Amino acid sequence: MAEENKPDEQEDENISPWQQIIDNPFLLLFICVAMPTVFYTLWGVMEVATIPTAPY
Amino acid sequence: MAQFRQCPDTGLFFHKEAENLMKANAVAGVVCLLIAGVLALLVVLTRWPAVHLLPADAFYMVLTAHGICALIFWVIFFEMAILYFAGSTLLRSRLATPRWAWAGFVLMIVGAVMTLAAVFAGKSSVMMTSYVPMRAEPSFYLGLVIFAVGALIGCFVYLGTLVVAKNEKTYEGSVPLVTFGATVACVIAIFTIASGAEILIPTYLWSIGYISHIDPAMYRVIWWALGHSSQQINVAAHVAVWYLIAGVIFGARPMSEKVSRAAYLLYIFFLQLASAHHLMTDPGISSEWKIFNTSYAMYLAVLASMIHGLTVPGAIEVAQRKKGLTNGSFEWLRKAPWGNPVFSSMFISLVGFGFLGGISGVVMGTEQISIIIHNTIYVPGHFHATVVIGTTMAWMGLTYLLIPVLFRRKMILPQAAKLQPYIFGLGMSLVAVFHMAAGTLGVARRHWDMGFAGNPLGFEYPATAYLLMGIAGIGGVIAVAGGALFIAIAVGSLVFGEKLQKEAGLLQSFGFPLADSAYTNEKPARLPMAPAEAVEADHGEAGFEAPGTFILAMVLLVSFVIYYFINWKYLSEVWGLS
């Protein structure tokens, strides 16, 4: 079933640079965790944490 | 030594360990769907005002179990099967660390059983959201955490498989689009599970007395990073399934791989931020946070869904036109294989997700108009369109595809299978539409008795609201019947279906390995890059490559604009100015 492989350089020429970048799943993981962590979770938690306490 | 077999019908390669895990996860998912479906019938027959089946305590217990079983266990077990399929089969790669994958599966089973046992014991009727200060049994939270750890292991096994495939050069160029979509689902799942750990571990410690207090507002913010993102895993995964089915049934290729991948990238950047739309009416959180996360970021995620919603049928149209179905704008669609449940499930999923789930989702994500339907039964109407019509029907279509390919069994009851997607799709569309309509009249979600009978602050809804809930009840019963038919066909095929391969015995249908004779030790040939599309005669019309799809997209856009402004009209009537 095996067949001869093409050189990596030849393959890379057929893939656009940006696609080569997003082919890295760990970069995708970083973006996917960082974006909502900053804009949703941290920002939201800070807003709740800074709600002033009601005076007695 | 990695062992592979090649499906003689599709040419797909299955790695032995990955194949068994796919089967085990898919079967576990269908068992959860069965439980969720039985519970759904009880919920439907209680919220149907004329029937009102269960007493209050039983209703809240059943509703909690239904939500968790359907929204978490069913979809995530099935997603694990999809990850292993996309990582191993589509890339022709061995699975990384199968023993860890099995450990993850066992943890998911243990977690699911613990959580459901806690709910059915009767002291954890806290709904899927388990908002504090409602307190469930500790085993309820612990079960969810254990389930999440198992799923997390599965996600990292998938990422490891991508690394193995890359290092062992099992494919040329980039991963296929379907695998890319599965990767997006996987990374969203990791964020989701991390968010779950952030909030459920402290809540577990609170439930056993180690922490004295959890701020309800804080809980809601972090919990919804889990709660809504878990449904975004579904979106990324079911869109990948749409592309897969379009490719398998029609030989369709995306109209533009770059555009489709860019749309997935928008999901990675923006999709989970839409979790904020659950908190539109929460005090203590600024409008800046709400508006950025929904009315800016969420719309970019919606744009991505609209791109996928355009490119999937567009790819099908282009493929059909190349086969000569070029008369008028819709011959390609009229002559699509509507009797094939793989296609019909997928197409109903796509249309229902876009028209019902997508449009209503944008309305719910708009801070001003969200307020008229917030916490009403409009919300379950919306997510039954996205998660049930969108995701579950895509999973159903994939199941019909995989019964002969993965399980090596011939599907039983083929005539019933042709009807099943229409029965389920019709029933669930009635549920979605009429729940949304009743929600617009203010009918509360999650409430045992919409009339608050016997309470000092009872509320008189217009009679129309009761009628709408009754029709939704009828729709729910039809949907449950369609779901039961699906399970009968799927499970019946695994047990009674004609064997397409002599090794495909009963136990093999449920995750046991096929006999060694079914596999070879030789590695599959490297997956070649898809060849560039040959320039062919233009099969479109009026300058459009896919004119029918363009018309459908315009219908969606007009429907959205009309419905959007109708809701602003509703809002204007809430507070009269004169």
Image (spheres, rainbow, N blue to C red):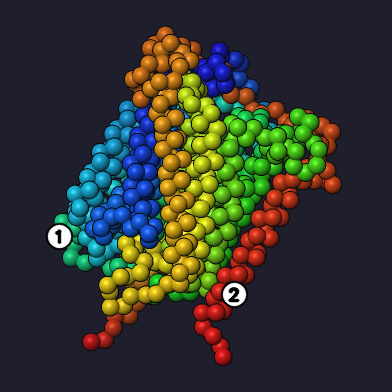
Q: Position of residue B386 (x, y in %)?
A: 50, 51
Name the residue rendered at 51%, 83% in the picture.
B575
Give how far apart the Cα atoms at labels 1 and 2 are: 49 Å
Q: Quadrant of the C terminus of chain B?
A: bottom right
Q: Residue furthest left?
A: B209
Q: Within 10 angstroms of label 2, few (less than 14), some, or many (20 or more) residues? A: few
Give the residue number, with chain letter if any, for mark 1.
B209
Q: For residue B163, say whether it is visible.
A: no
Name the residue rendered at 52%, 51% in the picture.
B429
Name the residue rendered at 66%, 55% in the picture.
B556
Give the residue number, with chain letter if any, for mark 2.
B569
Question: Considering only order in the chain, which callout, 2 or 1, is on the residue closer to the N terminus?
Answer: 1
Q: For residue B12, say whether it is visible.
A: yes
- Left or right: B546 in relation to B100: right
Mark 1 or 2, which is nearer the eye? 2
Q: Position of residue B294 (x, y in %)?
A: 52, 64
Q: Residue furthest bottom?
A: B578
